[in-house]
Image (cartoon, grey):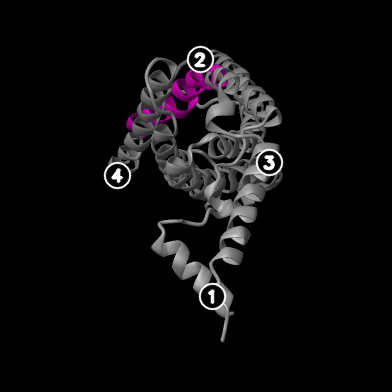
Amino acid sequence: MLASTVSQSRARANGVQSSAPSDVPPAWTRTDRLLARATAWALFGLGLLYILTTTAGFVIAGGLQAPIVDPAFALMELLILVEAPLIVMLFVSLHRYAAPSRRSFSLAAFGLVVVMAALTLGVHFVVLTVGRQVDASVMPGFDRFFSFKWPSVVYALDIVAWDFCFGLALVLAAPVFVGTGIQRAIRIGLVLAGVLCLAGLLGVVTANMQIRNIGIVGYAIVFPAVTPLIARAFSREYETATDARPDRAEIEASELTASNGHRTLAASSVDPLP
């Protein structure tokens, strides 16, 4: 105990600071890069398919004001059930990718995305299952629980998931991308998508779902358009990642060197007891 105290005090006096393993930035590995790129491109593809399905649904329904019906509606619900977990995976990659000084933003964004996914998965699974098996004629207030006609419970939960949680997550994720060029384009795109999502909440306040459609533009159009840029940024970053994100072997070597240095300092700085 005495040796430890003396060595620590002398190390501080000499301006020597310890380097804990937590101070080393995590590695951005090849697996991280491949998973992140695949997820981003998958979200882009799903976004395109969602837009095409929605367009076909309006055509089948006979106009933008008419409700979308099956089979387009069922396909849209299924696409959301696939998309939500992929968004969570993308934000896991964003957190792994983020520099240590930006990880508070990426972690907060990830937490909000988890809440979003939990809410929207519950909503759309219930609508696809319970909503289709309950006889609306024998259940009072069916539309207030299981329909996307405002106001309803499932509609409100879906709005808080996508417009609020996801919108705020997009804004928080934007600072992860620093610099100019493609990084700046991603940052602007994420902020724009997030602000549009948050603006959709005005539709709830005014009870006007046409205004709420602003949020849909944010998460269904602008966000998917940004995902190819994110995929490209992940690919480019990996080529120079060894400077900013050391691999596991380099981290272990650094920790071993620091540990040996501390032991040498402790052994040389202990005064013999009388």
Q: Is residue 13 above or below residue 224?
A: below
Quadrant into which the N terminus falls: bottom right
Cα distance between the residues tagged 3 and 4: 29 Å
Residue linked to disc 2 = 62
Please state if 217 lies on the left or on the right of 265 as rendered: left
Look at label 1 and name its amino acid. Answer: Asp
Label 4 residue SS: helix
Residue linked to disc 3 = 132
> Which badge, 4 or 2, is on the more N-terminal residue?
2
Label 2 residue SS: loop
> Which badge, 3 or 4, is on the more N-terminal residue?
3
Look at label 4 and name its amino acid. Answer: Val
Look at label 3 and name its amino acid. Answer: Arg
Please state if 27 lies on the left or on the right of 65 as rendered: right
Label 1 residue SS: loop
Cα distance between the residues tagged 4 and 2: 28 Å
> Which badge, 3 or 2, is on the more N-terminal residue?
2
Crowding around mark 3 (Cα neighbors within 10 Å: few <14, some 14 to 19, many 20+) is few
Q: Residue at x 60, y 34 (%)?
A: 246
Residue linked to disc 4 = 205
Front of the two marks 1 and 2 = 1
Quadrant of residue 33 within the rendered picture: top right
Spot occupied by residue 152 in the image (x, y as percentages of width and height): 47, 47
Crowding around mark 2 (Cα neighbors within 10 Å: few <14, some 14 to 19, many 20+) is few
Cα distance between the residues tagged 4 and 1: 72 Å
Q: Are marks 3 and 4 in contact (CB under 8 Å)?
A: no
Most foreground residue, 114 or 183: 183
Cα distance between the residues tagged 1 and 2: 90 Å
Residue 159: tell me if it is visible: no
